[in-house]
Every structure is written in structure tokens, then in C-alpha cells.
Amino acid sequence: EIVLTQSPGTLSLSPGERATLSCRASQGVSSTYLAWYQQKPGQAPRLLIYGASSRATGIPDRFSGSGSGTDFTLTISRLEPEDFAVYYCQQYGSSLWTFGQGTKVEIK
Amino acid sequence: DVQLVESGGGLVKPGGSLRLSCAASGFTFSSSSMNWVRQAPGKGLEWVSSISSTSSYIFYADSVKGRFTISRDNAKNSLYLQMNSLRAEDTAVYYCARYPGYFSGGSYYYYFDYWGQGTLVTVSS
């Protein structure tokens, strides 16, 4: 089973700053198998990025994904107030799905 | 609009059973693979189970294998999760989520594009 490790656990930033979130896999992951989600308190997760770098429908272009192999990154170029949330990466492999433990982006 | 609406959650004693439902609308349910994902209070997301469009392929997380059963009724546009031998550690919000099976450029893309609002299952004596 592939384990996804996200870092940092918590990111304290101010609106307008750049956020860089990391997702590291214990084994290589195909880029088409890697997705990112945003979750706000009391809400279901929302798809942000699929295929490691493709934005989902309606996702602002301040969100971008990159990476390959075992290292993937979600970047929020300029944080808006509504971006403060928890972010999860997800991968698929061997008929199983796994999520990272999440990175919380909080207001500094 | 796509909608996934879970129901059936509640309080159950350890060792008890519960059946969750997910009613789908706004898309061709019979063509979509579906999943259950759970989230314990204050914790992260954990995939629970998946079922292919025709129920031919079913998979479970090790943590629920042998206790939970996923099923679907395409005529009713509904997904189910039968949960038996429930434990305190099964306490969580349970979400249903769609895997769209997007294929492009010779590759399948794996992600969940639509999620329900979740239903809370509490296992406690």
C-alpha cells in the first residue's frame, strides 16, 4: 500500500501570501493517479486538482499542482480568505485509494 | 446538477449493524463507479470501499474487510453500505463519492469529482 505523507502539518500564512504544500509518496505514483482536495469545516471535500496538475472545473487559477514520481506539490499563488482550509492529496493504486493526512492552512 | 445524498447514519452500540444509503441524481449513475469515504471526528479522510458500475469489481480497505458490504441498485440510482460488527473506531462521517472514470490521452485519471454531504455514524454504548 502506498503511503502519502503531507507536509507541513499546519501552514500559518497571511492573505495574499503564497502557500506551498507537499505530498510525498512511499513509492512512485503515476501523475494521472494523483489528486488534491480542499475541505472546509463541516463540508465535504472539494476536488481541486486531478492528474497532478489539471484544475477541476471552476477552480481559480491561483491553485496549481505539479510534481511526478514520489513528490507532488500544491501551490496557492496568493491566498484569499476563502482558501484557509485543510488540503488532502489522494492516490490510487492496486485497486485501493489512499489519502495523505492533510495540511491545514490557517490565518497567521 | 449532480447530487449525492447520504442517509442512514445514527447511534449504534458496539457489535451492532447499520445500513447507509446514497441517493444519486443529475448523472448517469449506472455508468459510474462509486465509493465510500469516511472521516473520524477531527481526523483525515479514509477510503472505505469502492464498487464498479455493474458491481463486478468491489474492493474494501483492510480496516472494514469482512464487516462491511458495499452494493448498489442502478434501477434506483442508489449506493449502499451495510456495516456489521461495528466498533468504536468506525465512528465517523461517511461520504459517498463518484469516480468518473475520465480517460484522456491514453490514460485513465483517478479522482473523486462529486461528494455527498455525509452522514454521521456514532458507535457507542
Image (cartoon, coloured by chain):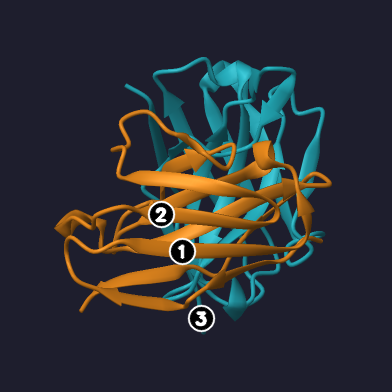
Position of B80 relative to B52 (above/below): below
Q: Label 1 to label 3, Cα distance in Å? A: 36 Å
Q: Label 3 to label 2, Cα distance in Å? A: 40 Å
Q: Nearer the viewer, residue A23 or B109?
A: A23
Specify whether B48 is left or right of A60. Answer: right
Q: Chain of mark 2?
A: A
Q: Which x, y percent locates residue B106?
A: 74, 18
Q: Chain of mark 1?
A: A
Q: In what element is the residue under mark 1?
A: strand
Q: Could you say which quadrant of the image residue B85 lies in?
A: bottom right
In the picture, the disc for residue A21 is 1
Position of B76 relative to B67 (above/below): above
Chain letter for the cyan colouring in the rendering:
B
Q: Which x, y percent locates residue B103?
A: 66, 19
Q: Amino acid at mark 3?
A: Ser
Please tell me which residue is depicted at 61% across the width and 42% down the height of the picture. Answer: B35
In the picture, the disc for residue A75 is 2
Whether residue B41 can be seen here: yes
Q: Which residue of the protein is positioned furthest toward the bottom in this rendering?
A: B125
Please tell me which residue is depicted at 53% across the width and 21% down the height of the picture. Answer: B76
Q: Nearer the viewer, residue B123 or A60?
A: A60
Q: Are marks 2 and 1 in contact (CB under 8 Å)?
A: yes
In the picture, the disc for residue B124 is 3
Q: Amino acid at mark 2?
A: Thr
Please tell me which residue is depicted at 37% across the width and 51% down the height of the picture. Answer: A44
